[in-house]
Amino acid sequence: MHRRFPCATRHRRCRRALRTLAVLATAGALAFPALAAQAPLAGFVRRTLVVGGTARDALVRVPAARPGGATAIVLLLHGRGGSGTALVTGAGRAAPYRAWLPIADREGLVLVAPDGLAGPDGSTGWNDCRGDGDARVEADDVAFLEALADTLAREAGLRVRRVFAVGTSNGGQMALRLAVERPASVAAVAAIAAAMPAKPRCPPPARPVPVLLMNGTDDRLSPFGGGALGGASAATTRGTVLGTEASIATWTRLAGVPARPVDATEFPRSRAVGTRVVRTTWGTPGRPVAVLVRIEGGGHVEPSVTERHGTVITDIVGRQDDTIEMAAEVWRFFAAFAGP
């Protein structure tokens, strides 16, 4: 596996980075050992749901009592080798998904961080739509996530079904599978460092779902231009994905909107990191069909202003933009579909 990364294992710094990555949930395309259990953040409660005879776990955080009660459910999907706990706690390290907590309190969101199951290589993950690759998790994750959302919606007393899904890498690919196979079950999805499969084993999407992609142009694991996913061991492959722009086009064509975007916003370049963010929107102003957050120079990691990874991590996964907050940017997109 080490040959795929731009550092030599004889270097002490590289060896330390590889050990650190064994507990990094955000580097979702890599195959890592299962993460050790971490103490969940205050407000999260572990729940177990039996689906198809299999017990499945998730961390659930219900917002404090507010007028009108909960407004929506947001599924937070970890990457390969991760867990729901590590995603929202960072396992002692930076955790960009932690930025969802103040948003959830303000907006009345039920946050759900479920656990994927182990695949044939022992690494936890999700059964997304990639038809190639031989480290696939064989589980009915669509049924699990749908049942989980249904159960929590009933408990929260949500009168209108508003379920959103956001995930990184393999978690982002799973969010896209929900959009493909259960378009009536999700109001919108967001995929970070992820794209549509090049050789899907799922049927093509038949109904448009609002989709946001947030990808770095220098992602070494999920190439911005498409192709083979990195991070596989010598004995396994991860499959292939479409390019980011081709993935967006899948959804804009399905929605029947012009290929020309309605808006393109360029953010100031990061002085510290050197990345630059460009947000492009298709559809109707205030009601986007698709959004691409292109991180020029960014790697296989969520951008964050507050949750910053050190060089031990970024030397492996690439540069982490520091000009936008992933959670805030995704909620800006989801919020267009969270109203009455």
Image (cartoon, rainbow, N blue to C red):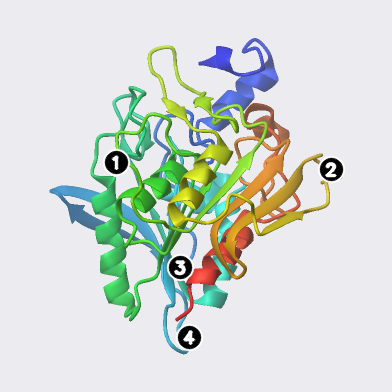
Of circles 1 and 3, the one toward us is 1
Above or below 205: residue 106: below
Tag 1 residue: 203
Above or below 133: residue 160: below
- Give the quadrant of residue 8: top right
User: Residue sitting at 46 percent across and 68 percent down?
Assistant: 43
Whichever of callouts 2 and 1 sits on the residue coming sooner in the sequence is: 1
Of circles 2 and 3, the one toward us is 2
Residue extending furthest left?
A: 53
What number is the disc on residue 217?
none
Identify the element where label 4 is drawn: loop
Residue 99 in view, yes or no? no
Q: Position of residue 123 (x, y in %)?
A: 37, 31
Tag 3 residue: 43
Q: Amino acid at mark 2?
A: Ala
Q: Position of residue 145 (x, y in %)?
A: 30, 55
Identify the element where label 2 is drawn: loop
Whichever of callouts 1 and 4 sits on the residue coming sooner in the sequence is: 4
Neighbours of disc 1 within 10 Å: few (<14), some (14-19), many (20+): few
Q: Amino acid at mark 3?
A: Gly
Quarter that holds the C terminus? bottom left
Relative placement, left or right, of 294 versus 79 is right
Identify the element where label 1 is drawn: loop
Q: Amino acid at mark 1?
A: Pro
Q: Amino acid at mark 4?
A: Arg
What number is the disc on residue 66?
4
Q: Position of residue 335 (x, y in %)?
A: 54, 70
Tag 2 residue: 272
Of circles 4 and 3, the one toward us is 4
Question: How much space separates mark 4 and mark 3, taking CA atoms?
Answer: 15 Å
